Image: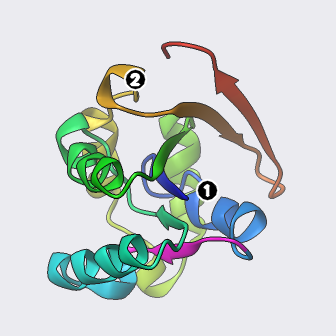
């Protein structure tokens, strides 16, 4: 079983990537939909108990934030895979500006996430780490990182 953790600022293509790569095999966990950490914990715990592969589709910018998920994955004997969305800040802001309604986040939120963003490492406990580059046309390139990013 596998827990995938997405790491990247708003507008980096995480949710689109989920739809393309994981929609048919993994349950998507996203705080924008669930609204509270309590609900998030409940659904994650249920996935782990029932051996349901899952994707944590949040920004997850810091090692401390990711550690909560990694601890749960290890306890449930799930493999933990990181996907780091490496998108320049100017592209994130441009993509965000194209969003409408609640999908559009304040520019300061995107910039704040970028300032906090820490690249994932094997020392955190990931079994595999991938870098994802999103292109404006909905295409992605994915590269596995052999050791460290």
Task: Please state the extent of the stretch shown in magenta in the rendering.
Answer: 25-30
Count numbered badges in the picture: 2
In this rendered view, identify the residue nearer to me: 35 or 97: 35
Percent of width and height locating residue 11: 52, 57
Name the element at disc 1: loop
- Residue drawn 84% across the image and 55% down it: 137
Label 2 to label 1, Cα distance in Å?
21 Å
Q: Residues within 10 Å of mark 2 (few under 14, many from 20)?
A: some
Labels 2 and 1: the sequence-earlier one: 1
Name the element at disc 2: loop
Q: Residues within 10 Å of mark 1 (few under 14, many from 20)?
A: many
Which dot marks residue 62? none
Q: Is residue 13 left or right of residue 107?
A: right
- Residue drawn 70% across the image and 74% down it: 23
Q: Is residue 25 above or below residue 77?
A: below
Label 2 belongs to which residue? Answer: 121
Percent of width and height locating residue 30: 40, 74
Label 1 belongs to which residue? Answer: 13
Locate the N terminus by quadrant: bottom right
In this rendered view, identify the residue nearer to me: 130 or 1: 1
Question: Which picture quadrant has residue 120?
Answer: top left
Magenta-drawn stretch contains 1: no
In this rendered view, identify the residue nearer to me: 146 or 93: 146
């Amino acid at each position: 079983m596998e827990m995938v953790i997405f790491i990247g600022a708003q507008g980096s293509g995480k949710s689109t990537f989920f739809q393309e790569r994981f929609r048919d095999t993994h349950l998507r966990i996203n705080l924008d939909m669930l609204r509270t950490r309590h609900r998030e914990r409940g659904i994650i715990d249920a996935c782990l108990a029932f051996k349901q592969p899952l994707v944590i589709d949040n920004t997850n910018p810091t090692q401390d934030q990711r550690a909560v998920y990694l601890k749960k994955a290890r306890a449930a004997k799930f493999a933990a895979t990181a996907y780091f969305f490496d998108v320049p800040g100017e592209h994130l802001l441009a993509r965000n500006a194209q969003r409408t309604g609640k999908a559009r986040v304040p520019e300061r939120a995107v910039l704040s996430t970028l300032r906090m963003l820490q690249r994932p490492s094997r020392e955190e406990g990931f079994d595999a780490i991938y870098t994802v580059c999103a292109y404006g046309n909905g295409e992605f390139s994915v590269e596995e990182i052999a050791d460290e990013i």
